Amino acid sequence: MIRYLSLIPVFAVLLLVSCGPDVPQEDGDIPLPGDTVLAEGEEVIAAEVNGTVIRHSDVLREAAAQGVIPQGGTLPTRDPSYQRVLDELIDQRLLALEARRLGLRETPQARRRIAMAEERILGNVLLESTIAEAVTDERVQRVFEEQSELSRPATEVRARHILVATQEEAEEIRRLIEAGADFAEMAVRYSLDTATRLEGGDLGYFTRQGVLPIFAEIAFNTPAGQVSEPFESTSGWHLLKVENLRTAEGRTLDQMRPGIVRFLTFQEIENLITRLEEEADIRRREPVEPGLLRADGDPVPPAEAPEDTGDDAPEATPQDGG
């Protein structure tokens, strides 16, 4: 699944591909308010550059790509970050239009890079569409209910205990408690458990899985407010007083939603990529010899090819006798 992580929502903004001239909008278009927070996707013009338009949604998409706002977030148009991103898009548009004027868009290098950028963008659009259709509130709710059913909240017990060396000591302390002595005071005075003695033997809340089996058996079978019979463990003899029982609160839908959405997103991307790979005709070629191609795919001219220095060849040795 790690191979799909780079596909999640790092949805690249359109660079040279989106820099082509758009059809100018009609005079009746909505003007851009000075300090209004607009929703992503509203076709409101943020700027006009030499007859082309940069939309408010373009600014929001670029702001999200830069991490200024979350995906799908909004940004007030008078926010300094909004103006900075808009300035960058204006500069980018000016550069792209100048490159078009000079005919650079038609060079082989530019066309290959534009094609690769288009592939990334189309792939991201497909992922956005697939995830939006699959990761719905209804599906998140269904997964939440399934997970809640599988992990029902456990019952927890809060108890105190006293640890002594012998059964006789434990029985005597129990008689004192039954006669009216306070359990916590007896723990401070007599318990050998240094971790809990000064806290009156308080063990806090725990589940059956959180303590030794003998503690769980005694604690969950002793009524609240009662003191157990003395019982033995590897540490010595114990008395246990159950203070309270409660059912732990399960996690809410709002708490679990981010994890569920992340899980469903990974699952949908993996399913999509797996299906496309199974249906595709993919033929991998043997890798070319390193150094014969540039990064842009053009062959390296012979004049620039590395010369064979002969470093790997065995050194010549003088011959005896000429």
Image (cartoon, grey):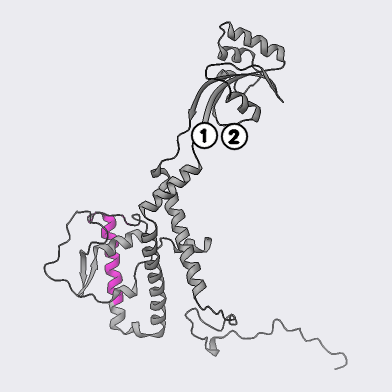
Q: How packed is label 2: few (under 14 Cα within 10 Å), some, or many (20 or more)?
A: few
Identity of the residue drawn at 43% across and 46% down: 144
Q: Is residue 275 above or below residue 251?
A: below
Q: Which quarter of the figure is the C terminus placed in?
A: bottom right
The residue furthest bottom is 322
Of residues 176 and 89, the one nearer the viewer is 176
Label located before the other in sequence (2 or 1): 1
Of residues 286 and 246, the one nearer the viewer is 246
Q: What residue span does the magenta drawing correspond to?
A: 71-96
The residue furthest top is 179
Which quadrant of the structure image shows residue 318?
A: bottom right
Identity of the residue drawn at 63% across and 11% down: 174
Q: Which residue is mark 1?
A: 154
Q: Amino acid at mark 1?
A: Ala
Q: Which residue is mark 2?
A: 209
Q: Is residue 34 above or below residue 16?
A: above
